[in-house]
Amino acid sequence: MRRWMLLLGALLIVAVPFVLAACGEEEEAAPAASPTEAVAEDIVDTAVAAGSFTTLTAALEAADLVDTLKGEGPFTVFAPTDDAFAKLPAGTVDTLLADPKGDLTQILTYHVVPGKVMSTDITDGMTATTVQGADLTFTIKDGSVYVNDAMVVTADIETSNGVIHVIDGVLIPPK
């Protein structure tokens, strides 16, 4: 019996490092497959990489806001998709891009809240003051979160300097 115990002990001594090494390899491989890479990129780089924010990123460039949103933050950006911009009346985007320091800057900064607001922080009726200076109002209807009249279609895309919530409309600040 003692011989079997020694043999089992020796087997464990030899096998444990291999088991631990195999577990370590699996743990190291998991982060590469997880979305943690997106966290290494800032808000602008994340939006560009997504491919569905070409109008937004062009507008940020025209309004000279790229460096700001690449800054330290944290920022919360309610990011309209290209489809959201397409819902605007014909010619609106071109008109805004023609005067980037005017209404375009006001509209873009109305999509940004200082600080990091995660979806779990949002409550029905909550307001948040934007970089532009006016408030956004949040409502929760049928399990969906709305920012003013735009629905959040994808929430909590974490970046190195904040968070992006994808919305299905363009937010227009009050005058």
Image: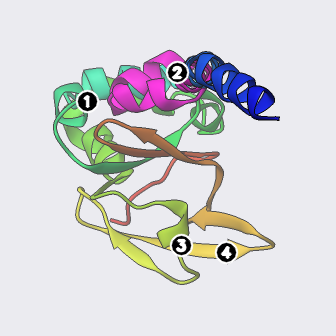
Whole-Å distance between the Cαs marked 4 and 1?
A: 35 Å
Labels 4, 1: front one:
4
Of the numbered discs 1 and 3, the one sitting upstream in the chain is 1
| Residue that mark 2 sits on | 28
Tag of residue 99: 1
- Residue at 62% of width from left, 38% of height from top? 84
Residue at the spot 55% in from the left edge and 21% down from the top edge: 50
| Marks 1/3: CA–CA distance | 29 Å
* Color style of the picture: rainbow
Q: Which residue is mark 4?
A: 140
Cα distance between the residues tagged 1 and 2: 49 Å
Pointers 4 and 2 in contact (C-beta within 8 Å) = no
Give the residue at the far bottom of this rendering: 125
User: Is label 4 in a helix, a strand or a loop?
Assistant: strand
- The CA distance from mark 3 to mark 2 is 39 Å
Which amino acid lies under the numbered mark 2 shown in the image of this protein? Glu
In whole angstroms, how far apart are the C-alphas of marks 4 and 2?
39 Å
* Amino acid type shown at disc 1: Asp
Disc 3 residue crowd, few under 14, some 14–19, many 20+, Cα 10 Å: many
Question: Mark 3: which secondary structure?
Answer: strand
Q: Which numbered disc flags the more N-terminal residue, 1 or 2? A: 2
Q: Is residue 102 above or below residue 120?
A: above
Looking at the picture, tell me which residue is in the foreground, 126 or 134.
Answer: 126
State left or right for residue 121 relative to residue 61: right
Label 4 vs 2, first from the N-terminus:
2
Tell me if 153 is positioned left or right of 137 in this view: right
Secondary structure, mark 2, is helix
| Magenta span of residues | 24-50
Residue 35 falls within the magenta-colored stretch: yes
